[in-house]
Image: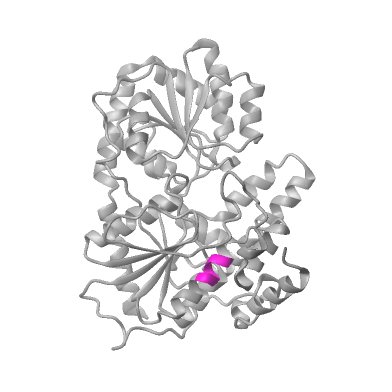
């Protein structure tokens, strides 16, 4: 086991970064202008009339849990189809990447891997000071991955300065990103929603003072992310709601934020004619057992719904932690046989589950976009969503391509579910309208074209 002297050495090693990139305890308020000195490929500013070489960074790219893996795979695929060269740099869990896209693994200690989260590594696993830093931050109840991934990515890209026209950071926002902008290539970022929303909701829902203090420590990395975001000269975000909220929460001038909506693979997510609907089947996606996703409100709604609709049951795409707030709530409400969880599914398996369902629900308290909402619409299943965050931007007006209710209200969810389960014609109409909206408004090709346009415009301004 590494001793205190080695941890101190790790902190000193990272502290050798320039003052503007130092650790949180040593960082003064960061100026809003971007870091100025960057290396570009020989010949000056890259030509804007040829395919671009892009390094796409994601500090964790789980293909089956959360939106970062989906964004990484689909954007890299679509950019490649447009003729650009994309190399993905990812920490564990690694994303699924299509042929034609290169994946460069950025291995960490993988301290949160299943089935052994918060594990204690064997001393032989420690390779360098960043590994020691990663373990040390975890031991103090912090979340080290954005910082340590960014430092490892900087180390890799520093050896390849000149290989890429630009680096695209997918919401890592670690201090190493600023070093990449200084030493390697211009950096553009994507922020899907302000992580400060997660922090506020998690702390507010913490059941004890000790848990609240633990959450505050866990979310200590958000101070770093805000500082780094203020230094990135151009940031992409998936909705106008998210754009406004990020500008306010991170104190970033709105002109530096550009909205580029996300897409959906309408070939994978589609109505499946040979699969029959299961009476009473409700489906939702909850990749993380956190208050922001609103799963507890949907479970409470299901408990009262089953008084009048005893065949109603919930299929959750996701995996709960053992003895989490969700598993306890299911047990307390006597719903053990009425709630199922499925995880590790590919797109075809998820599409089949949508095809079996009568209603899809997005019960989130806040969303910066919501890939599950557009996937449900593309699958042709009737959608019920809250008005949390950008969901009205995605779903449209209430009653057009989905039903909208106020967030955080189990009774509103129950009443809307009763209406939908009792009205087959309404479900058919909403399912068809949702499919049309997904095809017309949300495509990964359009996302890639708009993103590449932002790349070129950004490089022209460097």
Q: Is residue 33 visible?
A: no
Residue toward you, 387 or 351:
351
Q: Magenta span: helix, strand or loop, mainly?
A: helix
Residue toward you, 455 or 266:
266
Residue toward you, 414 or 212:
212
**Percent position of residue 392, x then y:** 42, 41
Lateral position of residue 389 relative to residue 225, left or right: left
Q: Is residue 418 above or below residue 219?
A: above
Residue farthest front in this picture? 124
**Percent position of residue 271, x then y:** 27, 31
Lateral position of residue 59 relative to residue 78, left or right: right
Quadrant of image for the N terminus: bottom right
Q: Which residue does the image show at 53% across and 68% down from the upper left?
A: 150
Q: Is residue 169 visible?
A: yes
Lateral position of residue 183 relative to residue 84, left or right: right
User: Is residue 28 on the magenta stretch?
Assistant: no
**Percent position of residue 346, x then y:** 37, 40
Residue farthest bottom in this picture? 43
Quadrant of image for the C terminus: bottom left
The span picked out in magenta is 148-152
């Amino acid at each position: 086991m590494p001793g205190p002297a080695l941890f101190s050495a790790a902190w000193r090693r990272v502290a050798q970064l320039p003052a503007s990139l130092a650790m949180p305890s040593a960082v003064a308020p960061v100026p809003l202008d971007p870091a100025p000195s960057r290396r570009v490929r020989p010949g000056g500013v890259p030509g804007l009339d040829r395919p671009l070489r892009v390094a796409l960074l994601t500090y964790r790219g789980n293909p089956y849990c959360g939106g970062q893996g989906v964004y990484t795979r689909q954007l890299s695929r679509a950019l490649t189809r447009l003729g650009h060269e994309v190399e993905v740099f990812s920490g564990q869990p690694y994303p699924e990447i299509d042929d034609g896209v290169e994946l460069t693994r950025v291995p960490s200690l993988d301290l949160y891997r299943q089935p052994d989260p918060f594990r204690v590594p064997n001393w032989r696993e420690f390779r360098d000071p960043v590994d020691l830093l990663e373990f040390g931050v975890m031991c103090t109840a912090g979340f080290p991955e954005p910082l340590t991934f960014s430092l490892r990515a900087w180390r890799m890209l520093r050896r390849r300065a000149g290989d890429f026209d630009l680096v695209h950071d997918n919401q890592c926002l670690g201090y190493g990103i600023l070093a990449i902008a200084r030493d390697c290539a211009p950096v553009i970022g994507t922020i899907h929603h302000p992580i400060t929303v997660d922090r506020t909701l998690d702390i507010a829902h913490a059941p004890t003072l000790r848990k609240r203090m633990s959450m505050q420590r866990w979310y200590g990395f958000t101070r770093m992310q805000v500082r780094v975001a203020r230094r990135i000269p151009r940031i992409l975000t998936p909705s106008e709601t998210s754009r406004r909220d990020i500008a306010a929460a991170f104190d970033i001038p709105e002109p530096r934020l550009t909205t580029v909506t996300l897409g959906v693979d309408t070939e994978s997510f589609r109505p499946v004619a040979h699969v029959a609907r299961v009476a009473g089947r409700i489906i939702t996606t909850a990749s993380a057992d956190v208050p922001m996703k609103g799963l507890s409100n949907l479970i409470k709604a299901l408990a009262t719904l089953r008084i009048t609709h005893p065949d109603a049951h919930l299929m959750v795409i996701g995996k709960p932690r053992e003895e989490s707030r969700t598993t306890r709530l299911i047990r307390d409400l006597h719903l053990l046989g009425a709630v199922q969880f499925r995880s590790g599914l590919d797109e075809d398996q998820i599409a089949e589950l949508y095809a079996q369902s009568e209603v899809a629900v997005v019960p989130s308290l806040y969303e910066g976009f919501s890939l599950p909402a557009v996937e449900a619409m593309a699958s042709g299943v009737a959608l019920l969503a809250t008005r949390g965050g950008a969901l009205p931007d995605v779903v449209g007006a209430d009653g057009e391509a989905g039903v909208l209710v106020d967030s955080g209200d189990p009774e509103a969810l129950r009443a809307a579910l009763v209406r939908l389960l009792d009205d087959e014609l309404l479900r058919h109409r909403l399912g068809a309208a949702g499919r049309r909206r997904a095809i017309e408004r949300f495509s990964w090709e359009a996302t890639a074209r708009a993103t590449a346009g932002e790349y070129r415009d950004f490089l022209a301004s460097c």
